[in-house]
């Protein structure tokens, strides 16, 4: 079995589009549909036929392209059962722990409420791939539009249990801003300081900062390091619960 081909590209203001393609079967999936026109052009340039559309959550910048893409290719459109009433065009809805097959590989659904109440991630263990939508970002996490700090903390904890080598594709290019914030709450983290410099260099050259990995995030993402004593001391929350530390980090990032 050959590895999946992955085409990651920028669209809208700061969204990422991601297309998966299996050269053996021809099966092709788009992760979310932020911009139907851009995605269609990438598919046509590559000569690929869209067979699957995998939707993480209902926000407009992740679903607005569904109609155009389904009209052009009629893919299977798979999304969260909990948000079925908010996403037009779904042909299949799945919940936490459900699986389906894509190009001979098992894709597992991981429920990650927080950013939205029904957000899901798509995990392909055979390829060490996680498509995290707006739950986990490089050096950050999604805003809590519909969920609680407890929800998002639990979601990130679940993702943190995946193998460190898991490659993470996220919905947005927020890494440079996230790095600036992370340094304000974890200033003694040498790995973070080195990563922030690398990120600045990459962005100066116009390069994307994704994918990241679960291992990178566990070492440098403050939202996945709530037990770190240096962060806790900096926040004045040495004896607080992990959820309380997370909530304070999210509160600070919201106004950063």
Image (cartoon, rainbow, N blue to C red):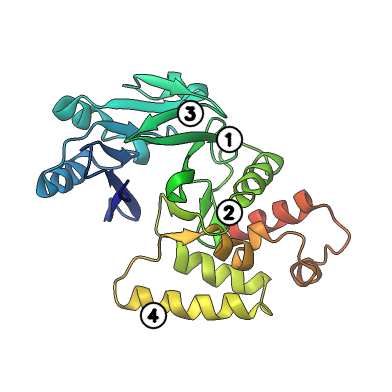
Quadrant of the rendered structure where residue 62 is?
Answer: top left
Q: Residues within 10 Å of mark 4 (few under 14, many from 20)?
A: few
- The residue singled out by tag 2 in the image is 163
- The residue singled out by tag 1 in the image is 146
Q: Position of residue 52 (x, y in %)?
A: 29, 32
Say whether disc 2 or disc 3 marks the residue closer to the N-terminus: 3
Does the CB distance between marks 1 and 2 fall below 8 Å?
A: no
Q: Position of residue 153 (x, y in %)?
A: 68, 46
Say whether disc 2 or disc 4 marks the residue closer to the N-terminus: 2
Say whether disc 1 or disc 2 marks the residue closer to the N-terminus: 1
Q: Position of residue 70 (x, y in %)?
A: 21, 27
The Cα–Cα distance between marks 1 and 4, rounded to whole angstroms, is 35 Å
As drawn, 243 above or below 97: below
Element at label 3? strand
As drawn, 72 above or below 191: above
Q: Residues within 10 Å of mark 2 (few under 14, many from 20)?
A: some
The Cα–Cα distance between marks 1 and 2, rounded to whole angstroms, is 28 Å
- The residue singled out by tag 3 in the image is 99
In this rendering, the label closer to the viewer, 1 or 2: 2
Does the CB distance between marks 1 and 4 fall below 8 Å?
A: no
Element at label 4? helix
Q: Position of residue 209 (x, y in %)?
A: 40, 66
Q: Residue at x 32, y 46 (%)?
A: 1
Q: Residue 148 versus residue 41: which sits nearer the camera?
A: 41
- The residue singled out by tag 4 in the image is 201
- Is residue 133 visible in the rendered image? The answer is no
Would you say 59 lies left or right of 39 here?
right
Q: Residue 147 versus residue 120: which sits nearer the camera?
A: 120
């Amino acid at each position: 079995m050959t590895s999946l081909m992955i085409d990651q590209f920028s669209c809208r203001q700061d969204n990422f589009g991601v297309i998966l393609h299996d050269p053996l079967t021809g099966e092709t999936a788009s992760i979310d549909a932020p911009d139907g026109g851009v995605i269609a052009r990438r598919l046509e340039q590559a000569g690929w036929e869209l067979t699957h559309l995998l939707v993480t959550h209902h926000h407009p910048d992740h679903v607005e392209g569904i109609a155009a893409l389904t009209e052009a290719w009629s893919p299977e459109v798979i999304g969260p059962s909990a948000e079925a009433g908010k996403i037009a065009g779904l042909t299949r809805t799945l919940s936490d722990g459900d699986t389906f097959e894509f190009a001979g590989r098992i894709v597992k659904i991981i429920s990650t409420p927080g950013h939205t109440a029904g957000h899901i991630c798509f995990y392909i263990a055979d390829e060490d791939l996680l498509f995290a939508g707006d739950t986990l970002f490089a050096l950050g996490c999604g805003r809590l539009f519909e969920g609680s700090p407890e929800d998002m903390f639990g979601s990130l904890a679940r993702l943190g249990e995946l193998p460190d080598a898991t490659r993470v594709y996220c919905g947005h290019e927020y890494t440079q801003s996230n790095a600036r914030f992370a340094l304000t709450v974890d200033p003694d983290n040498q790995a973070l300081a080195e990563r922030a410099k690398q990120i600045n260099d990459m962005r100066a050259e116009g390069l994307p900062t994704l994918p990241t990995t679960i291992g990178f995030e566990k070492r440098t993402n403050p939202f996945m390091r709530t037990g770190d004593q240096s962060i806790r001391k900096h926040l004045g929350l040495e004896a607080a619960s992990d959820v309380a530390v997370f909530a304070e980090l999210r509160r600070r990032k919201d106004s950063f």
